[in-house]
């Protein structure tokens, strides 16, 4: 009897093992570098230049490959068509558009925001405020530009304050973009006399320190560290304090002084929706904490991304004087010297548009976008992507694919212009392959605002000043192969000379 039982168990086990192997064989998994035991591929990647290492793997494994980093299955996508298929096409758009929690989740009151929240109705609603509210309530009414002009004037005065010496534009740009985002949210800049005026950057800088892989990894493995004295606990508590200051400035005061029907900025747009929902149905998806999360996301993404674009732009202008001269010729011709640039000027300025596209292609300032979590297994380009995999949209690799670009490491805006100097049509492969804002349901909701701010900032800047390389100081290279993950926010920074142009009448 015992022998029969033992024989049956062995036979069943063999059938089970056979079925597992057969199922695995049937499933076509993406190719990828061979890993080592439980470490996977963690030691084959330099965390600071991960986008670049993944770009190099692409040579061997193609644009879709997998690897294992610190226990997580990663899928790298290095082509715009794969990104489109994964994030924008039904049904994968419902599967591949979640996010992983990280050690900042509690800072956002348990992921009540957009950037690291799953794709829920509330996430879609918050995204909608960015996508539709900015053009709807601000730019069309010229409300926003009125306040923005004051900030631009202040930025220029600061930048030309030392015309005979080198200047690091970083701090001036930080103040400028902090106020641009404040105007967007609450309709006014932060007062210079406000003792908490540095809180937004303090909060964002700490937030980025918390999501550094080494800090995030430690806090996720040992969450109790947040509550203990020492490095991790101190950083966590400082972040919470800075968050609360920001919430007070941007939310508490706005809610206290809110008047129905008045829209000072995006926070009022959220408060109006909240009040309308409660009036109509007695409840709302939009809690106070969600609105605060929306504020934090807008500041984190808006201030840092705009700062990165303009910092890199100024560095590139130091290197490429000829491109600066051509930009200034187009600005003088279309806008002149007697009025401020307007968003509507953009459609008449092909070279400026080409420079913006090349700035975002060449610099690829969010090299791996924000990683996407897959909530189910699915098939992509014939490969099985496992449930729980994290997709890295490798925008850096898309933007530096030599088969598409030929000379990806050259800064050459002319690649986006036709023989007559006009911008290539939107369906041209060169335009379709520039995807700095990602694609699909999680693509950057602030992209229209970003395009208009970068346009206004660079045109109004070059309308008034000439950017020159520094004197007696070595200008860092702008080659993106040298960037680390943090570049161009990380120290060391650069200096340049900024001198006023002649004949300016503004
Ligand atoms: C040149 C400037 C900018 C670039 C290159 C950029 C790029 C990106 C990218 C690549 C993503 C992730 C897309 C994905 O997950 O697939 C993203 C997300 C996001 N961006 Fe931007 N961004 C810029 C400016 C802005 C601005 C100015 C704002 C707000 C005012 C903003 C708000 C956001 C938000 C809230 C998200 C998270 C969306 C979500 O998770 O659903 N961004 N951005």
Image (cartoon, rainbow, N blue to C red):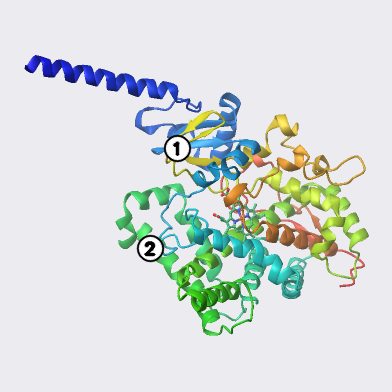
Name the foreground residue: 285 vs 39.
285
Q: Is residue 80 left or right of residue 461?
A: left
Q: Is residue 404 visible?
A: yes
Image quadrant assignment for residue 264: bottom right
Q: Position of residue 394 (x, y in %)?
A: 59, 40
Asked if residue 418 is positioned above or below residue 230 in the image, the reply reads above
Task: Give the residue at x 41% y 51%.
Answer: 216
Disc 2/disc 1 C-alpha distance (Å): 39 Å
Label annotation for residue 295: none
Q: Earlier in the sequence, mark 2 or mark 1?
A: 2
The C terminus: image quadrant: bottom right
Q: Position of residue 449 (x, y in %)?
A: 69, 61
Image quarter for ligand 1 equals bottom right
The residue where tag 2 is placed is: 234
Asked if residue 494 is positioned above or below residue 238 in the image, the reply reads above
The N terminus: image quadrant: top left
Q: Is label 2 or label 1 in front? A: 1
Name the foreground residue: 466 vs 206.
206
Is disc 2 placed on a helix, strand or loop? helix
Is ligand 1 less than 8 Å from the beta carbon at label 2? no
The residue where tag 1 is placed is: 377
Is the residue marked by circle 1 packed among few (<14), some (14-19), or many (20+) residues within 10 Å? some
């Amino acid at each position: 009897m015992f022998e029969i039982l033992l024989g049956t168990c062995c036979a069943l086990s063999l059938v089970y093992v056979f079925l597992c192997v057969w199922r695995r064989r049937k499933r076509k998994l993406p190719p990828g570098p061979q890993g080592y035991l439980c470490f996977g591929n963690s030691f084959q990647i330099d965390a600071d230049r991960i986008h670049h290492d993944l770009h190099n793997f692409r040579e061997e494994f193609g644009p879709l490959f997998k690897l294992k980093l610190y226990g997580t299955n990663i899928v790298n996508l290095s082509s715009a068509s794969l990104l489109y298929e994964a994030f924008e096409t039904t049904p994968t758009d419902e599967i591949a558009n979640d996010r992983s929690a990280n050690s900042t989740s509690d800072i956002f009151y348990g992921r009540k925001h957009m950037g690291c929240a799953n794709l829920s109705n509330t996430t879609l609603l918050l995204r909608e405020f960015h996508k539709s509210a900015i053009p709807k309530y601000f730019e069309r009414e010229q409300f926003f530009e009125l306040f923005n002009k004051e900030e631009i004037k202040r930025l220029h005065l600061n930048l030309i304050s030392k015309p005979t010496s080198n200047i690091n534009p970083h701090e001036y740009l930080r103040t400028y973009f902090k106020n641009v985002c404040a105007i967007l949210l609450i309709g006014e800049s932060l007062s210079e006399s406000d003792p908490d005026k540095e809180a937004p950057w303090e909060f964002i800088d700490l937030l980025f320190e918390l999501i550094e892989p080494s800090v995030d990894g430690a806090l996720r493995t040992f969450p109790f560290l947040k509550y203990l004295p020492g490095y991790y606990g101190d950083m966590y508590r400082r972040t919470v304090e800075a968050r609360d200051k920001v919430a007070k400035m941007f939310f508490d005061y706005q809610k206290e002084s809110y008047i129905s029907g008045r829209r000072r900025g995006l926070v009022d747009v959220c408060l109006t929706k909240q009040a309308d929902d409660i009036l109509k149905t007695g409840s709302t998806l939009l809690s106070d904490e969600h609105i605060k999360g929306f504020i934090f996301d807008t500041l984190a993404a808006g201030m840092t991304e705009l700062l990165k674009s303009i910092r890199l732009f100024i560095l590139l202008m130091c290197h490429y004087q000829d491109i600066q001269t051509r930009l200034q010729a187009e600005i003088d011709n279309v806008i002149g010297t007697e009025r401020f640039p307007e968003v509507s000027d953009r459609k008449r300025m092909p070279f400026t548009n080409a420079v913006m596209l090349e700035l975002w292609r060449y610099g690829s300032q969010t090299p791996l976008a924000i990683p996407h979590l897959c909530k189910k297994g699915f098939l992509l380009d014939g490969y099985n992507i496992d449930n729980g995999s994290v997709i890295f949209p490798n925008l850096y690799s898309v933007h530096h694919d030599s088969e598409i670009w030929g000379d990806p490491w050259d800064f050459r805006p002319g690649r986006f212009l036709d023989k007559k100097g006009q911008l290539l049509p939107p369906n041209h492969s060169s335009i379709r392959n520039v995807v700095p804002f990602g694609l699909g349901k999680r693509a950057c909701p602030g992209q229209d605002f970003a395009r208009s701010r970068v346009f206004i900032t660079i045109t109004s800047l070059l309308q008034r000043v000439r950017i020159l390389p520094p004197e007696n100081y070595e200008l860092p290279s702008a080659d993106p192969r040298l960037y680390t993950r943090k570049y161009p926010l990380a120290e060391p920074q650069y200096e340049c000379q900024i001198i006023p142009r002649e004949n300016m009448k503004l």
